[in-house]
Image (cartoon, grey):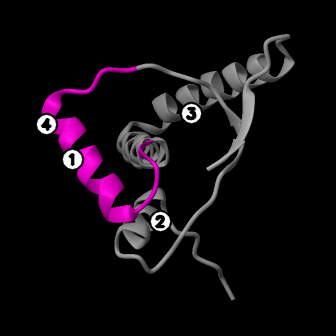
Amino acid sequence: MSRITPTALDQLVSELEHVGSSKYTGAVVPVQTRLQAHLWSMVEALTQRAGTSRNKVMNQLVEVGLEAIIDALPEDVALELNRVSGQLLYNLAVDDNRPETESM
């Protein structure tokens, strides 16, 4: 029997429809960004609808977008990006300035 793992999009939609929930526990890295006003207003609407934090919604939206981009790229480019991402995570883990750990 095969098990189907929900995508990041599936997970976010289930939370917006109030039929599912998720929790992340692990390393976090603070990143400051500025959003265009129309993006900010949709993020705020999604946050209110989900009844959760803006931080959680932003992380979910980034994950949804990254999954879509990786799926759309040629396999060699996706593999290279995953390799670089893995190396960056490794460097972060062994660095003296380790990231915070958080549950969201």
Q: Which comes sooner in the sequence, label 4 or label 3?
A: 4
Q: Say which amino acid is labelled 2.
A: Gln
Give the quadrant of residue 22: bottom right
Residue that carries the numbered disc 2 in the rendered image: 11
Q: Say which amino acid is labelled 3.
A: Leu
Q: Secondary structure at mark 1?
A: helix
> Distance between the Cα atoms at labels 2 and 4?
23 Å
> Distance between the Cα atoms at labels 3 and 2?
24 Å
> Distance between the Cα atoms at labels 1 and 3?
32 Å
> Distance between the Cα atoms at labels 1 and 2?
18 Å
Residue 59 vertical placement versus 91 (above, below): below
Mark 1 or mark 2: which is in front? 1
Mark 4 or mark 3: which is in front? 4
Residue at image point 56% right, 26% down: 80
Could you tell me residue 91's position as x and y percent? 77, 16
Residue at image point 47% right, 65% down: 11
Q: Say which amino acid is labelled 4.
A: His
Could you tell me residue 77's position as x and y percent? 47, 29
Mark 2 or mark 4: which is in front? 4
Q: Which comes sooner in the sequence, label 3 or label 2?
A: 2
Residue 56 belongs to magenta span: no
Residue that carries the numbered disc 4 in the rendered image: 38
Residue 37 belongs to magenta span: yes
Residue that carries the numbered disc 3 in the rendered image: 79
